[in-house]
Image (cartoon, grey):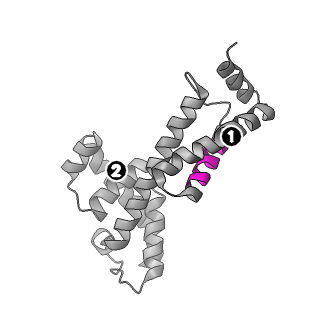
C-alpha cells in the first residue's frame, strides 16, 4: 500500500497519530500557501485549521482521489479564494447597503445610524445558502440583472429567479422583527 493510501485508510479509521502527523507536516506549508493568496497570516491559519477540522470531522465520508497533499492544497486554495470573495462582498456591501425597503415593504430603509439593522441584514444574508447568497448579493447589492447573473454563474434565468425568490422568503422571515 502506498503512503497516500495508508494516510487515507488511517484517517478513515480515526487514527489520531496519522492525523497529527499529517497536520504537523502540512500545516506550515498550507498556511504559507494560503497567506500568499489572502495576504493575511491569521486568516490563513484559521482557514487551514478549519480545513483540518473538517477533514477530521468528515473523515468517514470524504473522498480523496490521488494525493492527500494535493487534495489539501487544492482545498486551501479554494477556501482562500472564497475568503477573498467574501471579504470583497463585505466591503462592497458596506459601501452599498442593500435597499432593503425595496425588497421588503414595511421595513424602513436603513440609514448609517441604524447599525443594528445593517448588522442584522448583513448577518442574515451571510447565512443564506451559498448559491442563493451569491445570486441575491449580485442582484440586490451590486445591481446586476438576472440575465447577467445567469450567464456569469452558468445557470438558467429561471434558476436565478428561484434563488432570488428563495432569498426573499428566507430574509423576510428572518427580518420580520424589524418591521
Q: Is residue 165 left or right of residue 63?
A: left
Horizontal arrangement in the rendering, residue 83 relative to residue 51 (left or right): left
| Residue 157 appears in view | no
Residue under the point 68% across and 20% down: 3
Residue 63 spot, x, y in % from top left:
58, 27
Which is more toward the observer, 140 or 11? 11
Residue assigned mark 1: 57
Instruction: Tell me the number on the disc at residue 163.
Output: 2
Q: Which comes sooner in the sequence, label 1 or label 2?
A: 1
The N terminus lies in quadrant: top right
Is 174 rendered above or below residue 81? below
Taking the image as shown, residue 31 lies to the left or right of residue 124, namely right
What secondary structure is marked by label 1?
Answer: helix
Is residue 73 a member of the stretch shown in magenta? Answer: no
Compared with 102, 53 (above or below) is above
Q: Residue furthest bottom?
A: 113
* Disc 2 element: helix
Residue 127 in the image, given as x and y percentages of width and height: 49, 58
Tell me the mark number nearer the camera, choosing from 1 and 2: 1
Q: Residues within 10 Å of mark 2 (few under 14, many from 20)?
A: some
Q: 166 or 97: nearer the eye? A: 97
The picture quadrant where one finds residue 114 is bottom left
Looking at the rendering, the stretch of residues picked out in magenta corresponds to 44-53
Residue 5: quarter of image: top right
- Where is residue 69? Give x, y as percent: 59, 30
Amino acid at each position: 500500500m502506498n503512503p497516500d493510501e495508508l494516510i487515507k485508510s488511517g484517517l478513515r479509521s480515526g487514527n489520531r497519530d496519522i492525523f497529527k502527523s499529517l497536520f504537523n507536516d502540512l500545516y506550515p506549508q498550507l498556511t504559507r500557501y494560503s497567506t500568499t493568496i489572502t495576504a493575511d497570516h491569521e486568516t490563513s491559519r484559521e482557514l487551514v485549521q478549519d480545513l483540518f477540522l473538517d477533514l477530521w470531522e468528515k473523515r468517514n465520508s470524504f473522498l480523496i482521489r490521488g494525493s492527500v497533499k494535493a487534495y489539501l492544497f487544492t482545498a486551501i486554495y479554494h477556501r482562500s479564494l472564497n475568503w477573498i470573495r467574501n471579504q470583497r462582498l463585505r466591503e462592497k456591501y458596506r459601501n452599498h447597503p442593500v435597499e432593503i425597503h425595496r425588497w421588503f415593504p414595511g421595513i424602513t430603509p436603513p440609514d448609517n445610524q441604524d447599525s443594528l439593522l445593517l448588522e442584522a441584514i448583513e448577518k442574515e444574508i451571510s447565512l443564506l445558502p451559498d448559491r442563493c447568497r451569491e445570486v441575491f448579493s449580485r442582484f440586490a447589492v451590486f445591481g446586476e440583472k438576472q440575465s447577467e447573473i445567469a450567464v456569469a454563474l452558468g445557470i438558467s434565468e429561471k434558476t436565478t429567479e428561484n434563488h432570488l425568490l428563495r432569498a426573499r422568503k428566507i430574509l423576510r422571515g428572518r427580518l420580520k422583527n424589524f418591521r
